[in-house]
Image (spheres, grey):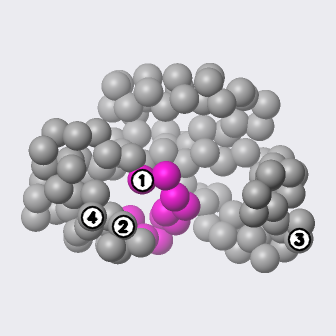
Amino acid sequence: MTAMVAAAVPYSLYDYETLLDFSVPPWFLETVDKIVRQKEVPVDYVVLRPAEPVCAARAAGRMEGAIRDYAACLELYADFKDVARRHVLANDDTDAAVVARQIREGLDEGKFRLL
């Protein structure tokens, strides 16, 4: 994760909007801060967090990389339970286009700004 964040910094420095689409748990945000602080790169943090049963069903229903036994993911899922509400989109029944619009609007409003 450290290398992934560090690799994104130069794009941001040249005014490219840079998106890391990955599970970045809250406990890693301190490291993110250390990586970007010197470069004064703004960071937004968006957590898509459907209810655990919805998440498990989506994981099991994937065309590729299906996760049939979600038990191994429960600890990672739990890592996101205490994220500040302003960073969370609970998208149990929301279609992808609506979620994308909510993310865009939240970014434009500064709702998800972390650093």
The residue tagged 2 is 4
* Magenta region, residue range: 20-29
Q: Is residue 66 left or right of residue 23?
A: right
Residue at the location (60% across, 38% down)? 89
CA–CA distance in space, label 3 to label 2: 28 Å
Mark 4 nearby-residue class (10 Å; few <14, some 14–19, many ≥20): few
Whether residues under marks 1 and 2 lie with C-beta atoms below 8 angstroms apart, the answer is yes
Is residue 28 highlighted in magenta?
A: yes
Residue at the location (75% across, 63% down)? 65
Q: Is residue 10 visible?
A: yes
Q: Amino acid at mark 3?
A: Asp
Element under label 1? Answer: loop
Give the x, y percent position of residue 94: 72, 28
Q: Amino acid at mark 2?
A: Met
Q: Which circle's residue, 4 or 1, is located before the other in the chain?
A: 4
CA–CA distance in space, label 1 to label 2: 8 Å
Residue at the location (40% across, 39% down)? 112
CA–CA distance in space, label 3 to label 4: 33 Å
Q: Is residue 41 visible?
A: no
Residue closer to the observer: 97 or 111: 97
The residue tagged 4 is 7
Whether residues under marks 3 and 2 lie with C-beta atoms below 8 angstroms apart, the answer is no
Is residue 12 highlighted in magenta?
A: no
Q: Main secondary structure of the magenta part?
A: loop
Element under label 3? Answer: loop
CA–CA distance in space, label 2 to label 4: 5 Å
The residue tagged 1 is 20
Q: Amino acid at mark 4?
A: Ala
- Indicate which disc residue 69 carries: 3
CA–CA distance in space, label 4 to label 1: 10 Å
